[in-house]
Amino acid sequence: MTQQDFLRQIASGRAEGVWLLHGEEEPMKQETVRALKDALLDPAMAELNCVTLDSPAPDEVIEACETIPFLSERRLVIVRDFAPFRTKKADRKADADAEDSPARAKSAKKDPQLERMTAYLGELPMTTVLVFWEAGKVAKNNAMYKAVLSAGGEITCDKLAGDALNRWIVERFREEGKICPYAVAQALVFVSGREFALLQTEIRKLSAYVGDRDGVTEADVYEAATRTSEYSVFRMLDCVVTGSEAKALELLRLMLRAGESPVGILAMLLRQYRLLQMILVMQRERLSAQEISQRTGLSGFPLDQYIKQAAVVRGGEVRNAVRLILDAEFGFKSGRLPEKGLTENVVLQLLELRHRYRTAK
């Protein structure tokens, strides 16, 4: 099951047995373990009834699971980086040979401790909750993986995106006692990015920022949330296309002072203009918003923002802007243009380009 499903299961009072915690998102695993501790353990006895084992032998795991909880109903055993989950090439070859010939399977070398471990999972005491915490994803053809699924279940902590990420944000704000409309969740992702740990911090920060208010607004996100470099470039482009020269240059200088690479800024600016170019072409072809979303990979709040920009630019202006940025990149890479002042000159030229198209008859 997903991490979100498991957290809902914990909230309903069901968290018994053996679990495999794996996937790409480590902060999500940390959150899951914290939720388990809060649900299972009395804070006064938590240190005595929770043990973490790093790369243990199977017998060590069994011994920890057999220990009786101290003045508590449950004991939590967390096993990190358990070797049997990491199948070796020799093991995979033995498995392949076993599939080819039952006789070879009988002669394949067995690990007595591992066999005892897999058999033990079905005999786990009701007082113990056992969690295998693995870095990255575990292969589904792994014998230990199959044994855990047979005796318990898995919790997948994969990177969230799209609707799943927005719902997660709404739910986390609810846990902080704040109402977060779906559109505000989209705005937070647009401004702060999709990095899980950062979003956790931003949710707590914004919840404190709004104080006694029940809900979080888009204005709160724009005012207080941490901005990614990509969003800062988007805002700079927004200032360029609306003719806010001073603000565009101020945003650029802030990025440069923060250590952003001038060439990196140009690359992000080029991507923004190319997205605008794609949207303008698709609008001329009378494609629907859904079709534009599918082709650009944008949806919801971010797509709305780009469509607003597209409404105030002209096709020729965007084509020339793309050419201008590409020329600047080539000039730098060929050694013809220095890095110092590169992005400032490009932004000034983009502002001049915008002015020419607005004043043209």
Image (cartoon, rainbow, N blue to C red):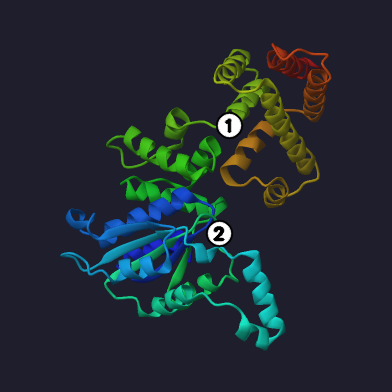
Residue 227, image x, y percentages: 52, 31
Question: Does residue 9 appear in this view?
Answer: no
Depth check: 311 or 54 in front? Answer: 54
Labels 1 and 2: the sequence-earlier one: 2
Indicate the secondary structure of the residue bearing disc 2.
Answer: loop
Residue occupied by mark 1: 231
- Circle 2 residues within 10 Å: few <14, some 14–19, many ≥20: some
Q: Residue at x 75, y 15 (%)?
A: 349
The amino acid at mark 2 is Lys
Residue 4, image x, y percentages: 44, 59
**Quadrant of the image occupied by residue 259:** top right
Question: Does residue 313 appear in this view?
Answer: yes
Indicate the secondary structure of the residue bearing disc 1.
Answer: helix
As drawn, which residue projects farthest toward the left?
71
Residue occupied by mark 2: 137
Q: Residue at x 55, y 59 (%)?
A: 137
As drawn, which residue projects farthest toward the bottom?
103
Q: Residue at x 32, y 35 (%)?
A: 208
Residue 254, image x, y percentages: 55, 18
Q: Is residue 211 above or below residue 18?
A: above
83 relative position to 345: left or right: left
Quarter of the image where the C terminus is located: top right
Marks 1 and 2, how far apart at CA: 31 Å
The amino acid at mark 1 is Tyr
In the rendered structure, are the residues bearing label 1 and label 2 in contact, judged by CB atoms less than 8 Å apart?
Answer: no
Q: Is residue 348 above or below residue 91?
A: above
Instruction: Please name which of the two marks, 1 or 2, marks the residue nearer to the observer.
Output: 2
Q: How many marks?
A: 2
- Circle 1 residues within 10 Å: few <14, some 14–19, many ≥20: some
